[in-house]
Amino acid sequence: MRTLPALLLSVAIAVGLGGAARALEEAPEPPHQQWPFEGVFGTYDTAASQRGFQVYKEVCSVCHAVKHLAFRNLEEIGYTEDQVKGIAAQYQVTDGPNDEGQMFQRPARPSDPIPGPFPNDQAARAANNGALPPDLSLITKAREGGPDYVYAILTGFKDPPAGFKVNEGMYYNQYFAGHQIKMPPPLSQTDQLKYADGTQATVPQMSHDVVSFLSWAAEPNLNERHRIGFKVILFLIIATGVFYAAKRKIWSRIH
């Protein structure tokens, strides 16, 4: 039978080990990044958003959809109408039925939604060992920490610390809860892609750019909302000045 001191020591050790395990599993808070769209007067960086779309198209779209976006929406980040038509024409979409009642494939048009990589969730799970890759249209709004969290996940793939066991089919990520994630590192320092504008495609740069694109995708009306807000604030300032001057003039006659 254990003595009381021995029992208390056992409990303390168990609590300590449990606390250490929880501390190891808890992901650190993602470091804050500087985003040009933050703040009252923030706006999206057109060049960064276009580079981010390139990262999505060439890397992320293999597994993830952006089902709330149509090709024509890309004009909002600086693509011309002809460029959008060219981008859309690179995709095949299902249409129909035709006169014979058959569905058929055709090149996409600007009005079409950007096609996802899988026809349905079941096919997506089957292709990813049971894991369902999330749609990225609203990912920066759906995750706590927003853009900082998504950026941290993309740049958080590291070698596990000594003694940390990574389960089969999982990858260590510094900022993911539990530090084990099924998604393999999507970005690499090797010549994964070449930016059309000549920017060096490092992992931090690609991560920053694709998060800029996804932040726009989640809130495409931000620029317009900020423009309207600025006009409203300017109007209120001018109106306040006019009303104050009128008050001074009216009350100056009263002595």
Image (tube, grey):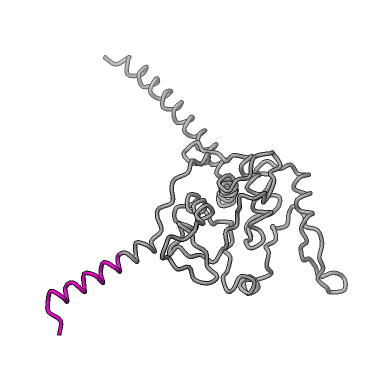
Residue 19 placement: quadrant:
bottom left
Query: Which residue corresponds to the image point at 29% horizontal and 16% vertical from the top-left?
Result: 254
Query: Do we see residue 221 in this rendering?
Result: no
Query: Do we see residue 182 in this rendering?
Result: yes
4 on left or right of 138: left
Q: Position of residue 67 (x, y in %)?
A: 64, 60
Name the foreground residue: 227 vs 40: 40
Q: Position of residue 198 (x, y in %)?
A: 69, 39
Q: How many marks?
A: 0
Question: Farthest bottom residue?
Answer: 1
188 on left or right of 110: left
Question: Farthest right residue?
Answer: 100
Magenta-colored stretch includes residue 82: no
Q: Look at the image and give the residue range highlighted in magenta.
A: 1-19
Q: Position of residue 162 (x, y in %)?
A: 42, 62
Q: Position of residue 89 (x, y in %)?
A: 79, 54
Relative to residue 243, is residue 121 depicted above or below?
A: below
Quarter of the C terminus within the rendering:
top left
Name the foreground residue: 114 vs 187: 187
Q: From the image, give the main secondary structure of the stretch colored magenta.
A: helix
Quarter of the N terminus within the rendering:
bottom left
Query: Which residue corresponds to the image point at 40% horizontal and 21% vertical from the top-left?
Result: 246
Query: Which residue corresponds to the image point at 48% horizontal and 29% vertical from the top-left?
Result: 234
Question: Farthest left residue?
Answer: 4
Query: Which residue corresponds to the image point at 49% horizontal and 62% vertical from the top-left?
Result: 172
